[in-house]
Image (tube, rainbow, N blue to C red):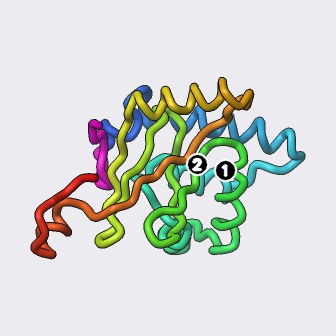
Amino acid sequence: MRTLLQLNLNKKDRYPNMSPQAAFQKASSRLRDHLKNQRLRLTPERLLLLRAIVSQAGHFDAEQMSSRLSRGRHPISRATVYRNLGLFEECGIVRKSIVGQGRGLYESVVGREPHDHIVCTSCGRIDEFEDPKVEEAQSGLARSTGYRLQGRVFEVIGICPACQKRAGAPPKSE
């Protein structure tokens, strides 16, 4: 297993396959199409939230995003953030994960390769990883069940090496 990214990503790592501007363009196109199909409007608030999501490094929760946008030049309400995160999840712009102790986190998925998470239940550290065995298991599951898969959420929880060290226990893997 190879750790790809940690929560503190730099701009280069956020979109390995495209620039942040290209990711915003792709996400806004996806959003426009979804809104048109749902007969909803593309509001300035939705565009501000979309830009904030695309510029966000790593994972975020709805409260963090709400707090960030309520202090901005054009404040957005908490209700608008929550309502639109669900909409953005529907159209494949963000992915919501329930990590650790039931905490819901979001991340932008536009321009990112599929990946999974390993989460420390002690400090909340989140590492992202890719493992070909997970991809193989997913493909095998689809073949054996006849499902056409639309995605996955695979999260492994445990205690990171730093927390194990602080607790005085040697790092172990099972």
Residue picked out by circle 1: 88
Marks 1 and 2 in Cβ contact (< 8 Å): yes
Q: Is residue 78 left or right of residue 117?
A: right
Residue type at numbered disc 2: Val
Cα distance between the residues tagged 1 and 2: 6 Å
Residue occupying image coordinates x 30% and y 39% = 4
Segment colored magenta:
1-10
Indicate the secondary structure of the residue bearing disc 1: helix
Quadrant of the rendered structure where residue 79 is? Answer: bottom right
* Whether residue 110 is situated above or below residue 67 in the rendered picture: above
Indicate the secondary structure of the residue bearing disc 2: strand
Task: Find residue 19 and report its horizontal and vertical position in percent.
Answer: 42, 31
The 10 Å Cα crowd at callout 1, few under 14, some 14 to 19, many 20 or more, is: many
Residue occupying image coordinates x 57% and y 26% = 139
Task: Find residue 78 and report its horizontal and vertical position in percent.
Answer: 63, 74
Q: Depth check: 32 or 114 in front?
A: 114
Q: Depth check: 35 or 162 in front?
A: 162
Q: Quadrant of the N terminus?
A: top left
Mark linked to residue 94: 2
